[in-house]
Image (tube, grey):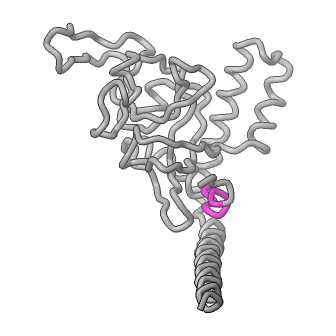
């Protein structure tokens, strides 16, 4: 009888193992199929989209090189070389791993891989109210936060607490918020707790979110940003690569 019980447990473990690997193969199959479809889609990107993408890439390369020149990181003789190096070798996006409940339900809390569009500098002509942005944590400069941009310079901020005086955001200031309504202000770790932040702390805009190989999609940003980011997303989005870099 004891032998029969041991055999039953072995069979149960083997059945569970086969089920796990079958699920893993199916998931990989989904990624492979999507990757093939995506490669075909990229090859069919319209000429106008490519032209817009190249224009965005050139603008980024020039802006970044000029920023480095003004900051004393490169000389005037190196500006041209850096422009073309960024243009031909660089990309306009990078992956960012995010874990936390602050941006739920827009961005899941179990850990997601985000595709972020790089910004050489953040100002009201490049980022807009309603954008989901990546910024330096005001309290931990070595860390980064993902929050929704709620207000920029010139906006009047009025608190729900009547004891707090209204104020206007000064030049180059902005207000960022978390989206999880279940969290209290202190738990959300946004401008309600640390106040306005400098626009220069914003390093990128989130344009795509991958939760798993079969659960991913575009992030809803402002209308202006959605239009600006469309050619970048069409050319540089690689869900297969995102899935490979996913830590979950």
In front: 186, or 137?
186
In front: 84, or 191?
191
Note whether 16 is above or below 232 in the view shown.
below
Q: Position of residue 39 (x, y in %)?
A: 66, 69
Q: How many marks?
A: 0
Q: Position of residue 160 (x, y in %)?
A: 17, 21
Position of 33 with respect to 123 (left or right) is right
- The residue located at (51%, 68%) in the rendering is 214
Q: Position of residue 227 (x, y in %)?
A: 44, 48
- The residue located at (37%, 29%) in the rendering is 187
Image quadrant of residue 45?
Answer: bottom right
Per the image, is 94 magenta?
no
Per the image, is 240 magenta?
yes
Position of 67 with respect to 160 (left or right) is right
Q: Position of residue 105 (x, y in %)?
A: 36, 49
Note whether 6 is above or below 66 in the view shown.
below
Residue extent of the magenta highlight: 237-243
Note whether 191 is above or below 126 in the view shown.
above
Task: Inspect this view and state whether residue 161 appears.
Answer: yes
Task: Inspect this view and state whether residue 33 appears.
Answer: no
In front: 75, or 55?
75
Magenta region's main secondary structure? helix
Position of 242 with respect to 226 (left or right) is right
- Quadrant location, the C terminus: bottom right
Note whether 199 is above or below 102 in the view shown.
above
In front: 69, or 54?
69
Q: Residue furthest front?
A: 1
- The residue located at (72%, 26%) in the rendering is 65
- Quadrant location, the N terminus: bottom right
- The residue located at (61%, 49%) in the rendering is 53
């Amino acid at each position: 009888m004891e032998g029969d019980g041991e055999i039953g447990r072995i069979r149960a473990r083997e059945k569970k193992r086969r089920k796990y690997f079958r699920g893993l193969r199916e998931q990989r199959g989904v990624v492979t199929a999507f990757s093939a479809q995506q490669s075909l889609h990229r090859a069919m990107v319209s000429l106008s989209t490519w032209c817009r993408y190249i224009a965005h890439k050139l603008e980024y390369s020039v802006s970044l090189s000029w920023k480095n020149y003004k900051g004393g990181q490169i000389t005037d003789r190196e500006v041209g070389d850096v422009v073309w190096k960024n243009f031909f070798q660089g990309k306009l996006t990078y992956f960012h791993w995010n874990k936390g409940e602050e941006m739920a339900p827009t961005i899941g809390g179990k850990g997601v891989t985000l595709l972020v569009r790089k910004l050489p500098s953040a100002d009201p002509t490049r980022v807009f109210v309603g954008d989901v942005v990546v910024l330096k944590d005001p309290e931990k400069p070595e860390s980064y936060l993902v929050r929704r941009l709620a207000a920029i310079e010139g906006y009047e901020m009025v608190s729900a607490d009547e004891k707090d005086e209204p104020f206007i955001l000064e030049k180059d200031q902005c207000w960022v918020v978390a989206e999880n309504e279940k969290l209290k202000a202190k738990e959300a770790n946004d401008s309600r707790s640390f106040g306005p932040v400098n626009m220069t702390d914003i390093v990128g805009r989130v344009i795509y979110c991958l939760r798993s190989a079969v659960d991913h999609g575009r992030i809803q940003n402002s209308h202006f940003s959605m239009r600006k980011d469309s050619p970048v997303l069409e050319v540089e989005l690689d869900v297969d690569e995102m899935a490979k870099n996913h830590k979950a």
